[in-house]
Image (cartoon, helix red, strand yellow):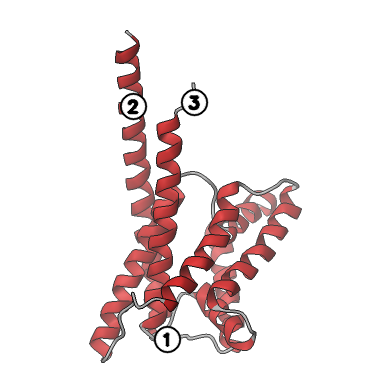
Amino acid sequence: MINYRRIILQWVIFFVGIMVMSYGIVLTIVANLGVSPWDVFHLGLANTTPLTPGMAVQVTGIIIVIIVCFLMKRYPQIGTILNMIFVGVFIDVFLLLPVTPTGENLFQQLAILVIGTVLFGVGAGIYISSNLGAGPRDGLVLVLNIKKGWSIGRIKTVMELSALGFGALLGGPVGVGTVIISLTIGPIMGFNIEYWKGLLGKYTEEVKSNEVVNER
């Protein structure tokens, strides 16, 4: 029997996570202290082309999805496609709307960076816990792990260092924020993935129990 409540909840969690993550990314950008390695590349690409930051995220995602499809010989999950599209859309929308604070001094910039990093990790953990498909970059990490047998840590490190290097060459913002995000985003994401998966599982079990009771 199809559990429609679970499906609806999964999609709500997915889009809430995408929005929270995107807003967190935007806060790390406006903090002006450096961004995550991949965002160094995205912003560097946006600086050297007519693309907006959100469009740079989308274009990069499209290329990675094509690579993953070629390696796996299958189409991506719908969640992967929607992640690629909506993260870019939300980033551009949040950058245009007056919903982001501006740091007037170093203390305020650091506060914005920390809040942005936390929201980035929380949002990523929320959307991943929906199990509707990993983002393009995470998908490539998993594919290379399966196909080549390389460790996930090694693949992720090489990919992020490559993105950071190319992004820096393109003029992307590298700074103390880049280091802070790189060191903290993993634990924040990991905690939230487990938390939200547990919450979703608990809700599903409660729904199943209620259905059994109602059927009796």
The type of residue carrying mark 1 is Gly
Counting residues from the start of the chain, the first of labels 2 and 3 encountered is 3
The type of residue carrying mark 3 is Ile
For the residues labelled 1 and 2, say whether their Cβ atoms are less than 8 Å apart. Answer: no
The type of residue carrying mark 2 is Val
Q: Secondary structure at mark 3?
A: loop
Q: Is residue 61 left or right of residue 180?
A: right
Q: CA distance from mark 2 to mark 3?
A: 12 Å
| Residue labelled with disc 2 | 207
Q: CA distance from mark 1 to mark 2?
A: 47 Å
Residue in front for this viewpoint, 90 or 125: 90
| Residue labelled with disc 3 | 2
Counting residues from the start of the chain, the first of labels 1 and 3 encountered is 3
| Residue labelled with disc 1 | 175
Residue found at the very far bottom of the displayed protein: 105
Q: Is residue 187 visible?
A: no
- Name the residue: 66% across, 63% down: 62
Tag count? 3
- Name the residue: 31% across, 14% down: 214
Identify whether 164 is placed above or below 22: below
